[in-house]
Amino acid sequence: MEQKDQILIEERAEIISKYRALLRSIRGLFGNEDIAKIRKAIETAIQLNPLLRRPSGELSIVHTLEVAKIVVEEIGLGRTSIICALLYDLVQVANISVKKIGELFGKQEEIIVDGLVKVAELYSRGTSIENENFRKLLLTFAQDLRVVLIIIAERLLTMRKLAKYDPESQLKISSEVAYLYAPIAHRLGLYVIKSEMEDLVMKFTNREMYSFIAKKLNDTKRARDKYINEFIEPLKKELDGQGLKFEIKGRTKTIHSIYNKMKKQNHEFEQVYDLFAIRVILDSNTKNEKADCWKVYSIVTDMYRPNPSRMRDWISIPKSNGYESLHTTVLGPQEKWVEVQIRTRRMDDVAEHGLAAHWKYKGGKSEKGMDQWLSNIREVLENPEVNAIDFIDDFKLNLYDEEVFVFTPKGDLIRMPKGATVLDFAFEIHSNIGKKCVGAIVNQRNVPIKHKLRNGDTIEIKTSINQVPKKEWLNIVVTSKAKGKLKQSLKEIQYKEAEYGRETLIRRLKNAKVELTDQLLHQLVKQFKYKTVHDFYYDISIHKLDFQAIRDYLFGDEIKSQDKESVDSTTSRSAENFVVSQINEDLPGTDILVIERNLKNIEYKLAKCCNPIFGDEIFGFVSVTGGIKIHRKNCPNANEMYHKFGYRIIKAQWASGKESEFSVSLKVTGSDDIGIISNISFLITKELKLKLRSISIDSHEGIFEGNVSVFINNTSALNVLMKKIKGIKGVYSVSRIENR
């Protein structure tokens, strides 16, 4: 009994200690009215939530008080956020409604607490990053940024106390923080929190390497501190002599960042030269900030030789999360490279504490780039066409840090992630521009849609009314906005195609005197192994599913019997005795084909896939519409037609002595010589007296590739033409084009 009483006394003392620590944190930051409201929230939390324990075994109220302290001290949020951090647990454990909190503290507090409660409820269901609930989780974050900032504070505290959890929970929580919360903290400019999260994740997921680097840093601390002082002392004297007010210090890089450098550079610990950075923090008024920073930069680079490739200017154009600083790497004493960061006190506050500090300097208004980032996230989150897994990939794309800065023709600055393409830029301007994009003029030079953007590019998008989005574009774009809009457009196109497929099926079945009922549709979808009716219709539309296969299934042995009888009847007859009675206008001339006499008054066409001409060995294929397509026997599709639809193949040959003009396309390659095209044209039109239909040339790295289309009578004339073109100086190869 005494031991239990002792534990209660100790826990009560801990609650009081945390309570007083939080009060000390807010003292001096807020007015009396705000402090009174925060005290009211603390006392309400303590009164109604005294005994609930967390999985680690600690009292929930202690954890809540510590989260609120991180919210105010390490993130720099205001009264509303502190109150919400203290109270949202009560809705879960003390049967207080969100509405009641609104009545006690205000509407804004009600909205944020409601968001925090929704997050807690999702976690209570065991939300996985692969679960659809994950979308709801992030959508809650995107509604009010203070929700995610408070959750980041809670996750940071949990990571600090992760040693108290069981091994399975340690791995689960660490993985989640590494995957989601550390990148979000980075994107929000919370670099200190992001760095600590990454180090703690490594501590619990790669403990051996973490301990190794930590020991190495500890062993080299004295030598490192000595070198930092050796670098700083002469710099201090020079800055003092210029009358600047500043603070200068060395900062050792995090264990996680050092490990990343070791992996990326494939180096041992001793080979990583930039284990620390020197930071110069200036006391400067807003008007002189840039000038003072560049003045320090000039002093540093006069004293130590800079590496031009390592210069970074985030003062002229800050990062989209508000980060501003000048970075340079210089050769210090003992010929060692040292990174130097130059910024003002305001810039340092924003760099260390992120968005909340930015609000403080902007009078409570969030940064424009951050508003756009949140807007993009909401856009992706609210797209019902994106499934959970695709969504996670899209969401991660919004967490980019490396950026390029490009311009519209009017000079408007656009931030894009590193690796973004012309097509990404087009979708960033407007989704309709993205859908119709065919390329761009970048710095007065024509480039394709896959061209990657670089800092300083001026981009003018080129569009065409005939352009439509294509599936392969998904491999070109990198931003979540472009991917989301593109997937949505492709879905719309697919739905239109599927509707056309439905109408086609109804029409074809009607011709066969069959009505498409729901029962029959279900039967067909199941028979041809489609997951959805939509996919079934779509494949009919693009001719991936042949209607003949549907007829075969519906009418079975009746069709097969008729087809077999038709095919068998050809075996005893000679095809030479029969002439086509009707030639379609697509087939040049008349009376040039000899096929079976029982197929009179049928339409005939030359197949586009192989473009047969007089002299080619050919066959006929009965199409689903009832007409006949004439193919070459070496047609790219011949094997599949013979294998799958042998009963629809009929014999055919050219009638002797009957010739006409046929269109043939040739592929010609050769050296990129301005006279070679003239020579080919002269040969065709003047020497051989043939009709030149068209010629198109594409040149690349001294090689040209051209498509030449001519009208010709037969294969003999074609062989003569190909031989003569190949004899032209500079021509490498000539081949007949076959469409597939």
Image (cartoon, rainbow, N blue to C red):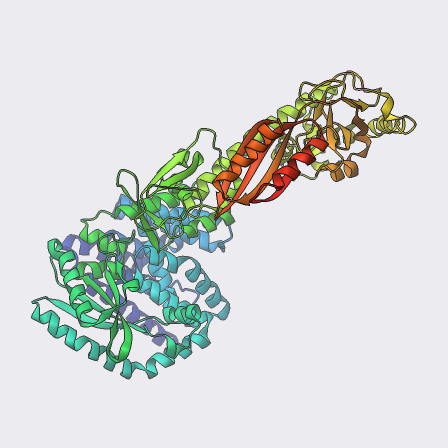
Residue at (60% x, 30% y) in the render? 687
From the top left corner, tell me how far across and down residue 573 is, in percent.
90, 25
Q: Quadrant of the C terminus?
A: top right
Give the image quarter of residue 24: bottom left
Relative to 589, 28 lies left or right: left
> Which is nearer the eye, 222 or 232?
232
- Horizontal and vertical percent position of residue 447: 41, 42
- Name the quarter where the N terminus is drawn: bottom left
Question: Which of the pair 286/562 is nearer the observer?
Answer: 562
| Nearer the observer, 59 or 221 | 221
In the rendered image, residue 639, in percent from the top left (x then y), is placed at 76, 40
Q: Is residue 727 shown left or right of residue 601?
A: left
Q: Is residue 528 left or right of residue 704?
A: right
Position of residue 92 measured from the top left corner of the image (x, y, whole percent): 40, 53
**Is any atom of residue 543 visible in this view?**
yes
The image shows residue 619, relative to residue 59, as above or below, that is: above
Q: Is residue 179 above or below residue 117?
A: below
State how many labels appear: 0
Q: Is residue 477 left or right of residue 69?
A: right
Q: Is residue 58 visible?
A: no
